[in-house]
Amino acid sequence: MSVLIFGILNIGFALLKLGGPLFSLAMSKVKVPGNSGISAMTSDPAFVALTKFNLWAGVIFGLALLAFGIGLLLSQNWARLGSIVYAIIEIVVVLVVSIVTWPITKRMMEHLPNVSPGMGAGFAMIGLVIGIIFGLAYPVLLLFFMTRPNVIEACQPEQPEAPI
């Protein structure tokens, strides 16, 4: 049952990750006021580089998750192992991106009107914590379930019966 559920979840998250470039393209066409937090973010070279990295990593991870999801639906061991590798890489990426994003988000929050710098930093920290929790939830669960004995057994190839 876990293999089926995570196969479906992998495909669902793959579609979300593959939809990211479309969303980014749509958002790049939106005009924002010059003094907004979004304007401050888009003028930051670190944010622009991080956005491009996330865009391409999302496409690559989305295609990988799609393949692993289909493989899990077929109970293939390579898909289980690929899901484990994906989960480990995704955990590292979420933590690194969160650390890199923190100062950018903090600067963005300081540009919001009628928000004191201390309150902006607090909002940025809350956003960071929520982002880490949501970002780590699926890869941690995927890693946990893909290493369970019942999942390992379900993905092992069946041995052909010897003729009598």
Image (tube, grey):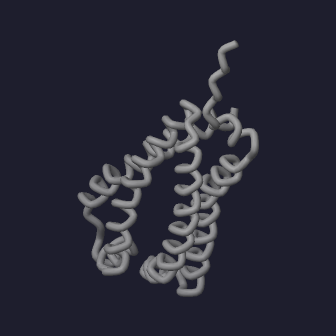
Residue drawn where x is 29% and y is 71% of the image: 33
> Which quarter of the figure is the C terminus placed in?
top right
Residue at the front extreme of this rendering: 164
Report the front residue among 16 and 25: 16
Give the side of residue 74 with respect to residue 129, left or right.
left
Is residue 114 visible in the rendered image? The answer is no
Residue 83, relative to residue 52: is it above or below? above
Report the front residue among 15 and 129: 15
Residue 50, relative to residue 56: is it above or below? below
Q: Quadrant of residue 95?
A: bottom right
Coordinates of residue 75 in the picture (x, y in percent): 59, 33
Residue drawn where x is 33% and y is 74% of the image: 49
Residue drawn where x is 38% and y is 47% of the image: 19
Residue at the top extreme of this rendering: 164
Q: Quadrant of residue 60?
A: bottom left
Coordinates of residue 39 in the picture (x, y in percent): 32, 74
Residue drawn where x is 51% and y is 37% of the image: 71
Residue 13, relative to residue 74: is it above or below? below
Residue at the right extreme of this rendering: 149
Coordinates of residue 73 in the picture (x, y in percent): 55, 32
